[in-house]
Image: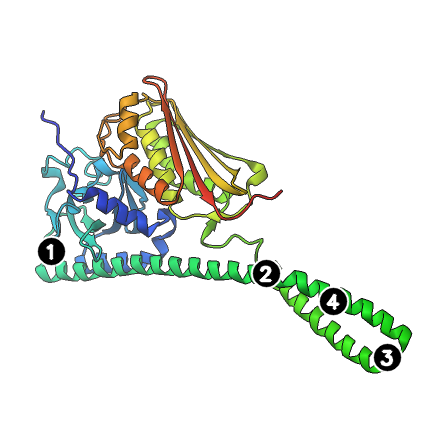
Amino acid sequence: MTELKNPVPENEMDRLLALAELDLDYSSLNDNFRDLTHLAAKVAGTDISLINLIDSFTQWTIGNYGMDIDQMKREDSVCQYTIMTDEPFEVPNLAADQRFREKSYVKDPISLRYYLGVPLKDSNGVNLGALCVLDPKLKTLSPEKIEMLGIIAGEIVNRLKSYKAIETLRNQVKEADATKKKVAHDIRGPLAGIIGLSEIIAQQGNTAQLDEVMDFIQLIHKSSKSVLELADEILSGDSDKLRESEYNLEVFADKLRKLYDPQAFNKGLRLKITFNESHSKIPFSKNKLLQITGNLISNAIKFTPSVGEVSVNLDLTAQDNKNALSIHVRDTGVGMTQEVIDEIMRDGTSTTKGTSGEKGYGFGLALVKHLVENLKGTMKINSTPGSGTSFQVLIPQEIPLPS
C-alpha cells in the first residue's frame, strides 16, 4: 500500500511564525470560545464543533463542543488538509476516504463520518488552523450554512487578535509600572535625607526655642514623610504577585506538564519536568516560552522510542548582573549527526520520521532557533547518534536574581 504524504502549506514557516506571535497558552482558552463552538454546531446541525490551531507537531483544540479533546498528532488530523486551502474543506464520508478511514476517530466507538472545516485565516492570509464541524451521520451543508460558519471563523480570528492586543497592552502597563517603581526608588533616597535633616534641625530648634522656624520645619518634616510613605507604598504594591504576563518556574513547569504529558503517555514515554526549588517563585516574562519549550519537547518525544525518557530542567541563572531562564531538554532518543545539527543551526528545515513513524515537518526546530534569537537568547545542541539529544536554551530576563 502506498504511504500517504502529509500536506505542508507552501508558507509553512510564515504560518508558524504568525501562530507563535500570538503566543497562546493552548490549555486556557476553551472557556473563551465556548459560545462560538456551540453556535457553529447549531448552525451546522452537527453533534461536534472544534476550533483547532496547528503548530509544527500538534493540533491543539482551543474550543470544543460535543467532544472532549484538547490535542491530537498533526499527522492524524483532518484539519491539516483544511489549512492547505482558502476555501472550506469538506469530507462527506471519512470512512470512505483513504486518508482518514483508518484513524481512531472514524472507528468505534466514535465513528465519525462527516467533516467540514473552515480555515482560520489572519489578516496576512495565513491559515492558523480551522473551525470544523463533525458528525457520526452522513450530512450535507447548504451554501448558506457554510457561509455562516465562515463568519464564525472570522470572529474566532478577531478574538485571537484581541487576546494578543490585550497581552501587548498588559506588557506596556508592566513597563510603565517598572518606570513608576524606578522613579519611586530615585526619590526615596533624597526624601529620606530631607527627613533626617529636618529631624536634626527640629531638635536644635527645640533647644533654641525658635517657634516660627519650628513650625516651618515641622511642615517640611510632615510633608516629606508623607511622600516617603507614598514611595514605599508604590514600591511594595503587588511586586510579590505573579502577573498574568509572567510565569515562575513552578507555574511554567505545571503548564508544560498539562500540555505535554498526554503526548508522552500516548507514546509510552516518561516526561520528567524539574526546576530549581530555590528559584521557584521568581517571576519572569512568559513571552514565547510555551512555543519554544513546547516545540523542543514535541521534537524530543517524536525521536524517542517507547519506554524512553524526555527530561526538562528549568532554572534561572545569573547573567550580566541579571538573570537568564535556562531550559534544558534531554531525551534518550535516536540522536542526530553533527551534519543535522549544523543544518538546524543554519535554520535548515529538513524532515525525518519519528521512532513510531510520526511524520516530520522539519520546521519546529528552525522556529525555536528563530524565536530564541529574537529574544536575544542562545541555543546549543549536543547529540550523538543512538545516544539521545540535549538542547540547552538561555533566554535573558529583566529581573535580577536575589543576592
In the image, residue 299 lies at what x, y percent? 32, 32
Question: Does dot 2 land on a helix, a strand or a loop?
Answer: loop
Question: Which quadrant of the figure has residue 384?
Answer: top left
Which residue reaches farthest bottom?
Answer: 212
Residue at image location 40% in from the left, 61% down from the top: 169
Mark 2 or 3: in front is: 3
Marks 3 and 4, Cα distance to the nearest angstrom? 19 Å
| Among the two numbered marks 4 and 2 on one chain, the one whose residue lies closer to the N terminus | 4
Residue indicated by mark 4: 195
| Among the two numbered marks 4 and 1 on one chain, the one whose residue lies closer to the N terminus | 1
User: Looking at the rendering, in which quadrant would you find the N terminus?
Assistant: top left
Question: Which quadrant of the figure has residue 295?
Answer: top left
Disc 4 residue type (three-letter):
Ile
Marks 4 and 1, Cα distance to the nearest angstrom? 77 Å
As displayed, is residue 205 above or below residue 254?
below
User: In terms of depth relative to the viewer, which is nearer, 217 or 247?
Assistant: 217
Marks 2 and 3, Cα distance to the nearest angstrom? 40 Å
Q: Residue 141 carries which label?
A: 1
Q: Is residue 233 left or right of residue 373?
A: right
Find out whether the residues at labels 2 and 3 contact each other: C-beta distance under 8 Å.
no
User: In terms of depth relative to the viewer, which is nearer, 269 or 360?
Assistant: 360
Residue indicated by mark 3: 210
Mark 1 or 3: in front is: 3
| Among the two numbered marks 3 and 4 on one chain, the one whose residue lies closer to the N terminus | 4
Disc 3 residue type (three-letter):
Leu
Question: Does dot 4 land on a helix, a strand or a loop?
Answer: helix
Instruction: Please tell me how crowded label 2 is: few (under 14), some (14-19), or many (20+) other residues with Cα within 10 Å.
Output: few
Residue at image location 20% in from the left, 40% down from the top: 111
Disc 1 residue type (three-letter):
Leu
Mark 4 or 1: in front is: 4
Q: Which mark is residue 237?
A: 2
Instruction: Please tell me how crowded label 4 is: few (under 14), some (14-19), or many (20+) other residues with Cα within 10 Å.
Output: many
